[in-house]
Image (cartoon, helix red, strand yellow):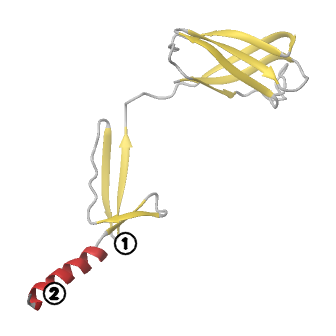
Amino acid sequence: MSSRYVFPNILTAIIDSIAKIIVRKNSGADIGARHRLNFIEGANVTLTIVDDIPDDEIDITIAATGGGGAANIKPITVNVPTPQREFKTNIIDADVLATSQIIFDWGTTSKLDRNSPSMENLKHNVTNVLAGSFDLELYLEDKEKLLGDYKLNYLVG
């Protein structure tokens, strides 16, 4: 084999190993390096690609619209009328399906609210999820009893 065939192969191997695009996310750590990146717009997805010459990089912004819709966080107030350690109530909501997942978080109840109890040891459990409703159980892990208004937020997923 002559040297004129070996040199192009060596040169190709060298260029192949060093001429790659470094990919990073949010101007942070490097993710990988390849010769080419292929960005594909999917349904309701828009790509904006800008050559950032001063920083010697290409900025890519991916925007999504539509799809599952905005999250609908629902505030509720559960009133526990008499002192008790556990309280169970049925929540009626037309958005709830038998397969829904109900996610809860504590609302704006604070010690400054009139008639509002402490939320520190309050726990919750969701059961009996049916089309149009679910059961919510509130309970305390300590010896205190539930009493008053509990403000909560939930999301149906």
Residue visible at 84% across and 29% down in the picture: 111
Q: Earlier in the sequence, mark 1 or mark 2?
A: 2
- Secondary structure of residue under mark 1: loop
What's the amino acid at mark 2? Phe
Q: Which mark is residue 96?
A: none
Q: Is residue 60 above or below residue 111?
A: below
Q: CA distance from mark 1 to mark 2?
A: 35 Å
Q: Nearer the viewer, mark 1 or mark 2?
A: 2
Above-or-below relation of 117 to 17: above
The quarter holding residue 149 reads: top right
Task: Judge from the rendering whether residue 12 lies leftward or rightward of residue 118; answer left or right.
Answer: left
Question: Which of the two residues, 92 or 77, is positioned nearer the viewer here?
Answer: 92
x and y, in percent, of residue 2 in the image: 8, 90
Relative side of 11 to 153, left or right: left
Q: Quadrant of residue 121?
A: top right
Compared with residue 101, is residue 36 higher up or lower down, i.e. above or below?
Answer: below
Residue positioned most to the right: 143
| Camera-side residue of 114 and 143 | 143
Label tally = 2
**At 14% from the left edge and 85% from the top edge, which residue is drawn?**
6
How crowded pointer 2 is (Cα within 10 Å; few <14, some 14-19, many 20+) is rated as few
| Label number found at residue 7 | 2
The quadrant in which the N terminus is found is: bottom left
CB under 8 Å between discs 1 and 2: no
Amino acid found under the numbered disc labelled 1: Pro
Q: Secondary structure at mark 2?
A: helix
Q: Which mark is residue 54?
A: 1
Residue 101 rendering spot, x and y as whole percentages: 55, 22
